[in-house]
Amino acid sequence: MTERPEPWEPGSGPVDAGKRHAPATERNRDAILAVLREALPPSGLMLEVASGSGEHAIHFAAAFPDLDWQPSDPDPVALASIAAWRDEAGLANLRPPIRLDAAAPWPVTRADAILCINMVHISSWNATVGLFTQSAKLLQKGAPLILYGPYFRNDHPTAPSNLAFDESLRSRNAEWGVRWLEDVTELAEAEGFVVTAVHEMPANNLTVVYRRA
């Protein structure tokens, strides 16, 4: 593996900079992987929405060689980073990244599972709406839509770190912010999904498994 790139935040930097490094991926990827091993089908097309730097896609595609992994992102910088990591990894089951804006029509006609990591709080609510409405068109009954990130929950104490993170997000963009899981689930149910698992994760995050009813 070549020298690690400098840490990066989505939306920053020149498009031609190649590989980017999101430090959180190394901290959370194995915890997420443990959930994916229980939730994903053994084979088929796995669509990753908002793939960011592409480091998760590399890690997970290597762990699931029988899944055809399709990374995506709306950010040209992220797409360039995903492509650079993919070229270096040389994984046969990892497809070239595609531009996909969750809030707009998707350039995808089918998927057997969908994964979305750390998008819901760093995007407009319209992106979350699009995530569920478009996923409902692609997934068959029983297929999973898996979300990872921080959430507020009724009847659960809120970690001070998540309150501070929410304030920081909203100061950067008024449309961003940590969402209430109940609001996300209400949206999911309206689009024909049910919650089948909520996993507590490190650093006060959750992995939520929805399935097409």
Image: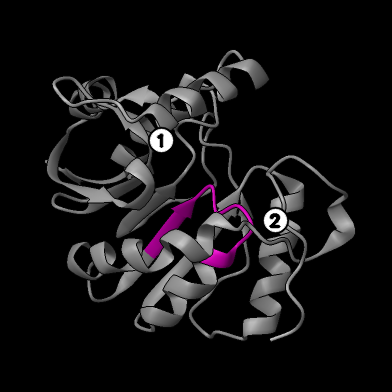
Can residue 14 be seen here? The reply is yes
Q: Does the image show residue 173? A: no
Question: Is 76 positioned to the left or the right of 92 in the image?
Answer: right
Asked if residue 39 lies in the magenta stretch, the reply is no
Q: Earlier in the sequence, mark 1 or mark 2?
A: 2
- Inter-mark Cα distance, 1 to 2: 19 Å
Q: Quadrant of the C terminus?
A: top left
Residue at figure coordinates x 73%, y 40% from the top left: 11
User: Residue 54 magenta-drawn?
Assistant: yes
Spot occupied by residue 101 in the image (x, y as percentages of width and height)? 58, 37
Q: Residues within 10 Å of mark 2 (few under 14, many from 20)?
A: many
Q: Nearer the viewer, residue 162 or 134?
A: 162
Q: Position of residue 86 (x, y in %)?
A: 64, 75
Classify mark 1: helix, strand or loop: helix
| Residue beneath disc 2 | 79
Tag 1: amino acid: Leu
Specify the amino acid type for callout 2: Leu
Q: Which residues are magenta?
A: 46-56
Question: Residue lying farthest front?
Answer: 160
Q: Give the labeled residue for mark 1.
A: 131
